[in-house]
Amino acid sequence: MTKQSNKNGFAQDLNRVFTLSDRTHQSTLQYFVTKFINDVDWNTNSKNKKIEQLQDENLNDYIEHKEHGVVLDNDKILQRNRDIEWQQSQLECNELLKQLLTECSQQLFPDEHQKSAASANAMDALEAQYKQLKKKSA
C-alpha cells in the first residue's frame, strides 16, 4: 500500500508514523481506531440515557406536584436542566470526534470500508426481501 494523501490530520499522522503495508501495523491501527469509535458510541448512548433519566426525574417531580400537592423543588429542576445542557454539549463533542475518527478510518482503510458497505447493502437487500415475504403471508 502506498502512502495516501489524506486530508484528515490524524490519518496523516498515523500514516506518517506507521507502515500500513505491514499487516501488523494495519491491523493494530484498525483495531484501535475502531475501538475508539465504539467507545465514543458507548459514551454517547450513556449520555443519552442520563439525559432521559434527568428528564424523567423532572417530569416525575412535576407529576407529584400536580397530582399530590408535593412542593416543587425549582432548584433541583434547574440543576437537572443545567446537567441536561451539559450532557448535550458533550454529545456535540462526541459527534464531532466520531466524524473525525470515521473519516480517519475511511482514509486509512478504504478496502475495509468498501467490504463493510457491500456487506451492509447485502443485508439491507435481504431485509427488504424478508419484509416482502412477511407482507405476502400476512
Image (tube, helix red, strand yellow):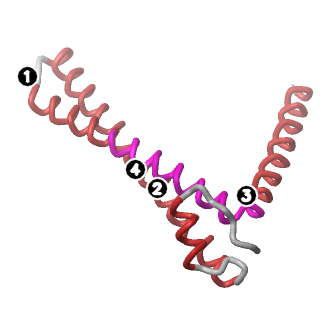
- Determine contact: label 3, label 4, CB under 8 Å: no
Residue under label 3, please give it.
Answer: 113
Which mark is nearer the camera, 2 or 3?
A: 3
Mark 2 closeness class: few <14, some 14–19, many ≥20 residues within 10 Å: some
- Compute the Cα span from label 1 to label 3: 55 Å
- Please report whichever mark, 1 or 3, sits nearer to the chain's N-terminal start: 1
Q: Which residues fall within the magenta stretch?
A: 89-112
Residue under label 4, please give it.
Answer: 46
Which mark is nearer the camera, 4 or 2?
A: 2
Mark 1 residue element: loop
Is 32 magenta? The answer is no
- Compute the Cα span from label 1 to label 2: 39 Å
- Determine contact: label 2, label 3, CB under 8 Å: no
Q: Left of 136 or right of it: where is 17?
A: left
- Compute the Cα span from label 3 to label 4: 26 Å
Q: Position of residue 25 (x, y in %)?
A: 63, 81
Which mark is nearer the camera, 1 or 2?
A: 2
Mark 3 residue element: helix
- Please report whichever mark, 3 or 4, sits nearer to the chain's N-terminal start: 4
